Image: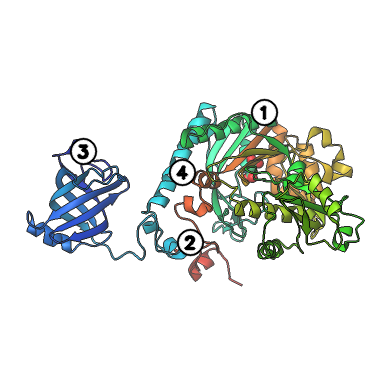
Amino acid sequence: MYRTHTCGELRITNQGNQVTLSGWIQRIRNFGGMTFIDLRDRYGITQLVFDQEKQPELFEKAKKLGREFVLQIKGIVQERSNKNPNLPTGDIELIVNELNILNKSEVPPFTIEDESDGGDELRMKYRYLDLRRNPVKNNLILRHKMAQEIRKYLDGQEFLEVETPVLIKSTPEGARDFVVPSRMNPGEFYALPQSPQVFKQLLMVSGYDRYFQIVKCFRDEDLRADRQPEFTQIDCEMAFVEQEDILQTFEGLTKHLFRTIKGVELNGEFPRMDYQTAMNRYGSDKPDLRFGMEFVELTELTKGYDFPVFESAEYVGGIVAPNCSEYSRKELDQLTKFVQRPQIGAKGLVYVKYGADGSFKSSVDKFYQPEALAKWAEQMQAKPGDLLLVMAGEKKKTLPQLSELRLHMADQLGLRDKKQFAPLWVVDFPLLEFDDETQRYYAMHHPFTAPKPEDIELLAGNPAAVRANAYDLVINGVEIGGGSVRIFDDRLQQEMFTILGFTHEEAQAQFGFLMNAFKYGAPPHAGVAFGFDRLVSLFAGNDSIRDVIAFPKNNAGRDVMIDAPSPIAIDQLDELELRLK
Ligand code: ASP
């Protein structure tokens, strides 16, 4: 037997027991005639004692050990004189009477400590060592527990977990596909699923009226902190339901997870906000509601004062930064620089300091007298001592820019507390999005999303105005999930494809199977998918989803540990009948 106990298990009640432990060396400390070694496994750390006087041979042997060696230890549990209240095993230690070196280790390239000295890339390259560290390990344990609770909850609601294929054909989630050449069908390719969307809809046609799957999805997109080329969704679909059923069911799942995993009760119904309101108030379809700072439009109020920027602007609006009227020149310059960063792309920022004494001082004093600025302040419900930050321009561009500023200010003011959770359903998304570059409409969610019945008549004449029965769950400004009520009528689906610019033949070639299926008794259905990595990372209080994925890829989409992607042999290419350009 390699072990009788784990390294996190022994307590004072085990005093006097002869036990066997196996694990890795976390730390070695030498004090003259005594050597202390912390032995670590997944469950914890136990202190080992080697006493020169009592066991000179073992003491000598222990001298040759190094960090991360794998040991098997036999010994007797004894009470520690120097207890460590921070460690569950901190009351005891092991007087070693047998030491077996199961394996040696090279000196690890970074310290296996909670705060490691290794940089991101180094830790990714040696991910198997990084995974030994508590913060990463705890994230994976959290992830596991969440997956179990998700299954428990959904199983309790009669959902069936069904696996869907990975080698498929393009799915329309709006990203680029990863493709896999087919050896048996030269010149042809599979696409990896951007989501199991079409399969879950087909399962509804098959009568499996509640489906879920914790499933890998693949999207070839530019990467960010909350994106990986392969990521995991909690993918769900239900038949004979309306939007309301989905919102209730998945609000239930969310509350269940918060309750069982975090011990947090999310009381009451999650607030709901329609897309247009979210955009107008927060400039984002995933507003962070942990704090206010809503936008106030000033377009009308600012016209007629000969300030050319505002005169010509389609939209003028601002936010109130509470108690910030004392911001220095430098701080204000930094805010302007922030919004002018290329990723945000604003031209500039106007500020108004509403002094605690009721005075007004602004960057547009030349154009606006204090009386005019007082009207802005009134409109914005600002109080003396506040700072007004105003931006202007084309509405479509200015709202998201102001949103960035709002989040930035909240960060500066410490208003985004990771222990606070503000869930929100954003509903009534537009069905379609017009792309100026290609001059055509795209489905905002995906082409299977149903328009609101009352908006269907607008489809022909004014498609941009059509709202969808589509919804997103947002928590703390993070899009946790999204879904929609589906079209289940083959003619409406065909019309949708036409609006999206598919010819009849193209639609048939790509989605003929789905429209055919719809001819055989498709039930009304709807669904949703949650980003599992994002949800875990929100629960863990991390900013990046990488930290909750066992083997993630870096920002260039590389797995630096196994070195993928990598070139393949000419033979392999030949077999696939492929030649590199
Ligand atoms: N397939 C969708 C997505 O991945 C979710 C859904 O509509 O159920 O965003």
**Closer to the N terminus: mark 1 or mark 3?**
3
Give the CA distance from mark 1 to mark 4. 29 Å
Q: What amino acid is labelled 1 in the image?
A: Val
Please tell me how crowded label 3 is: few (under 14), some (14-19), or many (20+) other residues with Cα within 10 Å: some
Residue 504 seen in this snapshot = no
Give the CA distance from mark 1 to mark 3. 56 Å
Q: What amino acid is labelled 2 in the image?
A: Asp
The picture places residue 367, in percent across and down from the top left corner, at 87, 61
Indicate which label's residue lies in the foreground, 3 or 2.
Answer: 3
Image check: 182 left or right of 400? left
Task: Say which quarter of the image contains residue 101.
Answer: bottom left
Q: Could you tell me which residue is drawn at 47 percent across and 36 percent down?
A: 261
Indicate which label's residue lies in the foreground, 1 or 4.
Answer: 4
Q: What amino acid is labelled 3 in the image?
A: Ile
Give the CA distance from mark 2 to mark 4. 21 Å
Q: Which residue is mark 4?
A: 143
Q: Which residue is mark 2?
A: 559
Give the CA distance from mark 4 to mark 3. 32 Å
Marks 2 & 4, CB-CB < 8 Å contact: no
Q: Which mark is residue 241?
A: 1
Q: What amino acid is labelled 4 in the image?
A: Arg
Residue 567 seen in this snapshot = yes
Q: Quadrant of ligand 1?
A: top right
Of residues 237 and 417, the one nearer the viewer is: 417
Image check: 541 left or right of 488? left
Q: Is residue 171 above or below residue 60?
A: above
Q: Is residue 158 above or below residue 133?
A: above
* Secondary structure of the residue carrying numbered label 4: helix
Q: Which residue is mark 3?
A: 12
